[in-house]
Amino acid sequence: MNIVQSLLSEGYFALFLIIAIAYIIGRIKIKGVSLDVSAVIFVALIFGHFGVTLPKIIQDIGLVLFIFTIGIQAGPGFFDALKKHGIKLAVLSTILILTAGLVVIAAHYIFGYDMGILAGLLSGALTSTPGLASATDQFGDISSIGYGIAYPFGVIGVILFLRLLPKILSADISKAEKDWEKESVSEYPTLNYEHIYITNTNVNNKTLSQLCFRKMTDATISRVMHEDEAFIPSPKTMLHTGDLVRVVGTEEALRRARVLLGETTEQEIPLSGKYEVQTVLVTNKSVVNKTLAELNLQTAYDATVTRIRRSGIDITPSPRSRIRFGDKLIIASSKENMKMVLKIFGNDDQKLSDTDILPIALGIVLGVLVGKFTFLGLTGGVLLVALILSKLGKTGPVLWTMSGSANVLLRELGLVFFLAVVGTNAGATLVDTFKEYGYQLFIIGAVITLIPMIVMTVVARLIYKTNVLTLLGALAGAMTSTPGLAAITPMTKSNAPQIAYATAYPIAMVLLVVVVKLLYLL
């Protein structure tokens, strides 16, 4: 027994024992439902109840790793989602926070509890450290008592609600993934190509530059055949009636090209033996964030980028298109110049899988500093910085990206570290809190956790018809629940929950601080 106690007193042993047991339990399915990685917090609660403690530094390390990798992963899609869904998610987050505030006010007038302890209950029910900081600043230490009572269910209740919600809604996760992907891809319509005979005499003897072809049609001419000679065009290429051109673009772009040039044909342009087309992988840091105009491939290397494939989406290239690390470019070039083009972009699969620790460390340092010197706190600061850095892609020689496999590993490692410490801390005080304050405050805290999520779910599904994956992420973000996000992350391969979480989280965090201050005025 002494040996067991001695081992459990060693933080690292207890940590990995909790993780190992949790992963065994998490794989057990009951009627198709399993806890997966969220089993860590339930195992940790039991260990915490029996006196096992883990160093807080493990929680902080896990938290910053998890939040930073989420920000890096969600960053590119976050800003697009903010433009497209920002108002909707802001409204939903506001509804949730205001509902929670109204429940607190009702509890104050019905049961007569001190507003200070209720403000703590509110912060604990939404697992918000900034909210607790605001509450203790306004009401004093009494708020921390309420926080301690509501926090355990605030963690566990959100996890259970989010895990069970797809079953309650009879939502098909696979279908939701496809719907979300279809919605995302709709912003970048599928690219096709057509061969067009030039019959419009107004085009005769005019260059692509004079015609402003790309601006007029939003399409790209990737090949031209003039007098039986096929070649890759440049802006100075002159078109003639009777020429055959290969045009790449969306359906609408191709329609405009037909109007400008002439008639489609089944005849195709054979690529001259002097030219070839290759898919080139961008792994050279020096070209990241540069535009195609800056690279000047046509003039320097007689090469044309006809398509950009990014995160599974085909994008029509333009001179203003910025290159990102990991992009796949469809490039047509002369054979003698293709080797140089490959060298410019890197085209090295190995580099794509390499992980540079420096950007991760620098990014986390910046995030901690931002959180320290603003109201955002540790989580908000690290998340905001990761989102911005991911959007920037590169600063000088530093590339703010990591391979998908590295991101997944660090993210899961971070979240199990975080959940293990959160669980043991909550487990240590759960029973004592019940004994000292009774069940009524705990039940009020549980109501503050559950009612706002139910209201937000009803509004999101009935009024906004929100995709269930976006809803899950938005709920976790609006509840400022990192464990909640950790619970839904294994449920889908889609980035939809992370993007919604990253959008809703900062909005909810600020609103909660404001609501706590309003409660003080009451």
Image (tube, grey):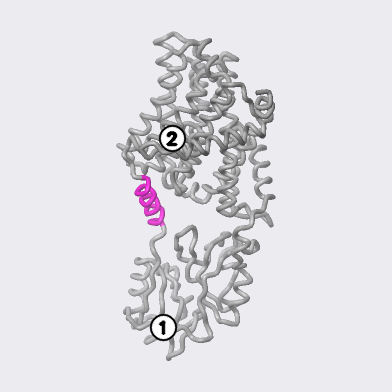
Q: Is mark 2 on a helix, strand or loop?
A: helix
In the image, residue 81 above or below residue 186: above
Location of residue 117 in the rendering, given as x and y in whole percent from the top left corner: 52, 14
- Looking at the picture, tell me which residue is in the foreground, 77 or 3: 3
Location of residue 88 in the rendering, given as x and y in whole percent from the top left corner: 40, 40
Is residue 347 shown to the viewer in this render?
Answer: yes
- Looking at the picture, tell me which residue is in the foreground, 452 or 351: 351
Our reading of the magenta stretch's main secondary structure is helix
Residue that numbered label 1 is attached to: 269
- Looking at the picture, tell me which residue is in the foreground, 267 or 164: 164
Kindly give the residue lying farthest to the top in the view shown.
112
Q: Residues within 10 Å of mark 1 (few under 14, many from 20)?
A: some
Disc 2 marks a residue whose amino acid type is: Leu
Please give the label number shown on residue 475. 2
Q: Could you tell whether 12 is left or right of 465 in the image?
A: right
Residue drawn at (39%, 81%) of the image? 203
Q: How many dots with numbers?
A: 2
Residue 100 falls in image quadrant: top left
Residue drawn at (45%, 79%) of the image? 223
Residue drawn at (56%, 62%) of the image? 323
Q: Is-magenta flag for residue 174?
A: yes
Q: Is-magenta flag for residue 178?
A: yes
- Earlier in the chain: of badge 2 and badge 1, it is 1
In the image, residue 106 above or below residue 75: above
Q: Could you tell whether 395 is left or right of 225 in the image?
A: right
Q: How crowded is mark 2: few (under 14 residues within 10 Å), some or many (20 or more)?
A: many
Give the distance between the C-alpha atoms of the residues marked 2 and 1, in whole angstroms.
53 Å
Q: What stretch is highlighted in magenta?
A: 173-187
Location of residue 6 in the rendering, given as x and y in whole percent from the top left corner: 69, 26
Location of residue 145 in the rendering, given as x and y in whole percent from the top left corner: 55, 15
Residue 158 falls in image quadrant: top left
For the N terminus, give its image quadrant: top right
